[in-house]
């Protein structure tokens, strides 16, 4: 089936706006993207006029957690994994509705959902799964310290505790065993953890080397949650290839990232807003206040140094982080001083590079037909990406999954 979208398109790679454009797709591929002039619409094609809207590559969130939650603050506690998995399966439709046709996930559920989407059992964004987040006992992900480590590792569907180089290798292999395509670790403390400081360094250099080495032997890479800077520095030295959050990075880490071409996955909406959200304990509020200002600075430093930035949300469809508003991250990037085009690039082509899927993230002939249409022009008003209400049309892998046009 040939689908032909007519209207304004933005070439995200260079910011070129084509007011009178055609984007045509057949099966799972884009077969034409450019000026309407010079394209003959074939008979029988399904023609969609986007009116005042804009045709864009589908959005990609490279810091997602498919936890299946509807409540803030509950994390993964107190629910059967089956319930979480089914909740997350349903919520894939919310992500699509918001224009997100790709996510890189860090959770147990993402492993299964990724295969279900690939096999066509479920309709959802393409998912690159990392399995559970690996961290140390008493570190950022140790959210249930009242449980034994063994019980935690059996029960928790978001995180996995590992200690010592041998255990680190085992923890990494446990994720690969279930189909993880990359490994996520916590190299520093964080805002949401009760027993650490945001600038705590978590894994030792020996542990980091064990984790990175094991990932490399599987032809993949490690990404690291980094709020503080020293843990980020040690992770970079050990060969970590991607940094998440990067809230308090200093020039030393930024320069090293630029030199090693390590991208930064920002999660700015959360950074800028957590301190103002209701329902969190005082200790978390105090940590969050520290982070908002620091994170704006690191974004500017990263821009200047030429570090590639990609969009992450850290959303889990809680009351405060609804998937229908995943696109608020684009707004937060602009609030933090990025241009509208930089934000668009972060949520499309730059994120696609981190997904490590070729021909994803741009509107180009031969590229994957993942497409989102917004009702405005995001280069003039980035808010038209912020909410599913502004996204009338979505195509995922060549299939129309939303059409209100
Ligand atoms: Zn996260």
Image: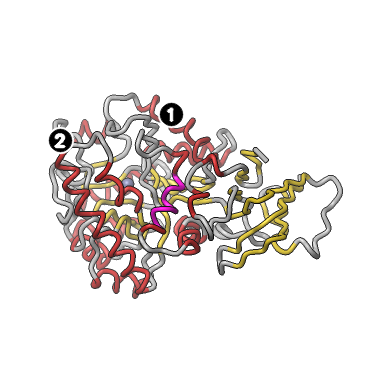
Q: Estimate the x, y position of residue 177 in percent, counting from the top left.
A: 38, 43
| Residue 290 tag number | none
- Residues 221 and 372: in front is 372
Q: 41 left or right of 347? A: right
> In this view of the protein, which residue sits in the foreground, 193 or 47?
47
| Nearest to the observer: residue 375 or residue 12 | 375
The mark tally for this picture is 2
Residue receiving disc 1:
87
Percent coordinates x, y for residue 125 in the rendering: 53, 43
Left or right of residue 304: residue 100: right
**Circle 1 SS class:** helix
Q: Is residue 66 left or right of residue 285?
A: right
Residue depicted at 68% across the width and 61% down the height: 19
CA distance separating discs 1 and 2: 26 Å
Mark 1 packing: few (<14 Cα in 10 Å), some, or many (20+)? Answer: some
What kind of element bears circle 2? loop
Q: Nearer the viewer, mark 1 or mark 2?
A: 1
Q: Residue furthest right?
A: 43
Res 307 quadrant in image: bottom left
Q: Position of residue 126 (x, y in %)?
A: 52, 45
- Residue located at (86% from left, 48% from top): 43
Which portion, as a residue range, is magenta? 326-333
* Vertical order, 338 against 270 (above or below): below
Residue underneath mark 2:
145
Q: Which SS type dominates the magenta stretch?
A: helix
Give the residue at x 52% y 51%: 59
């Amino acid at each position: 089936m040939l689908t032909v979208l007519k209207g304004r398109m933005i070439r995200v790679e260079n910011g070129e706006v084509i007011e009178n454009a055609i984007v045509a797709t057949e099966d799972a591929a884009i077969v034409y993207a450019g000026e309407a002039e010079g394209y003959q619409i074939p008979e029988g094609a399904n023609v969609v006029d986007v009116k005042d809207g804009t045709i864009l590559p589908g959005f990609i969130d490279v810091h997602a957690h498919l936890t299946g939650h509807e409540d803030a603050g509950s994390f993964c506690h107190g629910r059967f994994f089956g319930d979480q998995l089914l909740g997350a399966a349903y919520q894939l439709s919310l992500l699509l509705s918001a224009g997100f046709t790709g996510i890189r996930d860090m959770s147990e559920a993402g492993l299964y959902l990724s295969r279900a989407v690939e096999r066509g059992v479920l309709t959802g964004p393409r998912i690159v799964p990392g399995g559970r987040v690996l961290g140390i006992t008493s570190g950022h992900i140790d959210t249930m310290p009242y449980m034994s480590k063994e019980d935690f590792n059996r029960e928790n569907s978001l995180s996995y505790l590992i200690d010592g180089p041998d255990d680190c290798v085992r923890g990494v292999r446990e994720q690969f065993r279930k189909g993880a395509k990359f490994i996520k670790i916590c190299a520093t403390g964080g805002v949401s953890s009760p027993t650490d400081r945001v600038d705590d360094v978590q894994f030792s250099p020996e542990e980091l080397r064990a984790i990175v080495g094991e990932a490399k032997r599987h032809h993949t890479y490690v990404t690291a949650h980094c709020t503080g800077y020293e843990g980020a520095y040690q992770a970079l030295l050990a060969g970590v290839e991607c940094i998440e959050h990067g809230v308090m990075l200093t020039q030393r880490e930024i320069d090293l990232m630029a030199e090693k071409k390590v991208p930064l996955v920002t999660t700015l909406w959360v950074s800028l807003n957590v301190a103002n959200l209701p329902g969190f304990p005082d200790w978390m509020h105090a940590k969050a206040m520290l982070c908002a200002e620091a994170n704006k600075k690191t974004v500017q430093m990263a821009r200047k140094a030429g570090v590639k930035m990609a969009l992450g949300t850290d959303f889990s469809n809680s009351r405060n982080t609804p998937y229908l508003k995943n696109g608020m991250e684009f707004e937060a990037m602009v609030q933090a001083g990025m241009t509208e085009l930089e934000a668009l690039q972060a949520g499309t082509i730059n994120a696609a590079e981190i997904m490590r899927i070729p021909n994803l993230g741009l509107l180009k002939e031969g590229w994957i037909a993942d497409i989102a249409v917004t009702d405005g022009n995001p280069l003039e008003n980035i808010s038209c990406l912020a909410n599913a209400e502004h996204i009338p049309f979505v195509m995922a892998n060549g299939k129309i999954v939303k059409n209100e046009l």
